[in-house]
Image: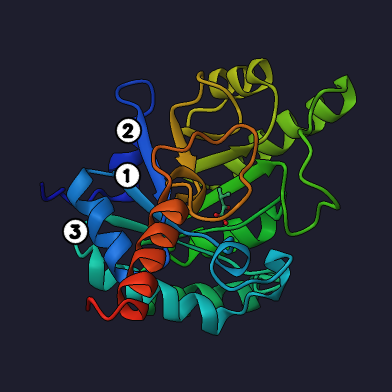
Amino acid sequence: MSTQKLTAEVLRRMKSVTPIPMLTAYTTPVARCLENAGVAVILVGDTVGMVEMGFDSTRHVTIAHMQYHIGAVRRGAPNTHIIGDFPYEADRDPATALRNARLMLEAGADSVKLEGPKYDVISHLVKNGIDVVGHTGLTPQTSTNFKQVGKEAAEAERIVNEAVGIEKAGAYMLVLEHIPERLAEKITHTVKIPTIGIGAGKECDGQVLVINDAIGMGDKWPPFSRQYAHVSKTITEAAETFVSQVKGRSY
Ligand code: KIV
C-alpha cells in the first residue's frame, strides 16, 4: 500500500482525530517496508548509533551519519513524512541548529526533532520555515540512564512546563519518552499539538517505537517495547542453515 505524504500541518491537525503511528528506520529496505505498511511518519532517530552502529550511546552520532541514513530512508520511502533527529550538540545554539537542520532537509527529511527545552533553538528554526518536533521526558542524549522519569511531583511539573514551553516555541508535535501514563495523559490534554509516546502509555495522540526493538532485532529491548517479530532469531537460523548446507556440500 502506498501512503500519501503527510505535511507537518496535517500531522498537527490529526490530534484527537486519528492516532499517529510512527516508527524509526535507518535503511532503504526497512523504510520501504514501513511505507508499504502505511506507517504515517518515519523517524530517522539518533538511536541509529546504538541499534545499528554499535555505539554505547547516541552521543557518538554525527550530522554526517544522519545525512547518510536520512538519504537511505528517503530512497526507500519517497511518500512518507520523515523526521530527521538532531544528533548530540548539533543543535547547541540557534545558528548551528539552523545550519544542521538544513543539511538534514537537503538529505531528505521533511521536519526535524530535538531533545529538551531548547526554546530559543526551536523558535529560530520555526522562524526560518523549518517544522520542528520537540522531545521531553527521558532525553537520552543528556540522561545518565534509561529509567522512567516524572514519577516525583517536582519532576512531573518540570516535564509539563517543558512540554508547554516547547509548544509555545512553535513545535508542531511532541515526543514523550518513558514517563508515567497519567503524566502523558495530562500533557496530551494540556498542549494543542499531538503527543507521540514511547513508553508513555496509551493516552498519547500517537506512538513511536524504535524499529529494531519492534521487530526483535538485537538482544535486549526496553521493557515498554513490544516485539512484533523475532528477526535476530530468523537471521541466525537462516545463517546456521546456510553454514550447514555449505559444509555438507548440499549448496
Ligand atoms: O532517536 C530516536 O529513535 C528517538 C526515539 C526513541 C523517539 O528519539
The amino acid type of the residue labelled 1 equals: Glu
User: According to the image, label 2 marks what residue?
Assistant: 13
- First in residue order: circle 1 vs circle 3: 1
Q: Compared to 7, does 55 lie above or below?
A: below
User: According to the image, label 3 marks what residue?
Assistant: 79
User: According to the image, label 1 marks what residue?
Assistant: 9
Q: Which dot, 2 or 3, sits closer to the camera?
A: 3
Tell me the quarter of the picture where residue 165 sits: top right
Whether the residues at callouts 2 and 3 have beta carbons within 8 Å, the answer is no
Whether the residues at callouts 2 and 1 have beta carbons within 8 Å, the answer is yes
Residue 213 placement, left or right of 240: right
**Which is nearer the eye, 164 or 87?**
87
The amino acid type of the residue labelled 2 equals: Arg
Q: Which dot, 1 or 3, sits closer to the camera?
A: 3
Crowding near the residue tagged with mark 2, few <14, some 14–19, many ≥20 C-alpha atoms within 10 Å: some
Residue 91 placement, left or right of 82: right
- First in residue order: circle 2 vs circle 3: 2
Q: Secondary structure at mark 3?
A: loop
Crowding near the residue tagged with mark 1, few <14, some 14–19, many ≥20 C-alpha atoms within 10 Å: few
Question: Which residue corresponds to the image point at 62% horizontal and 69% vertical from the top-left?
Answer: 87
Question: Which residue corresponds to the image point at 73% horizontal and 65% vertical from the top-left?
Answer: 57
Q: CA distance from mark 2 to mark 3?
A: 19 Å
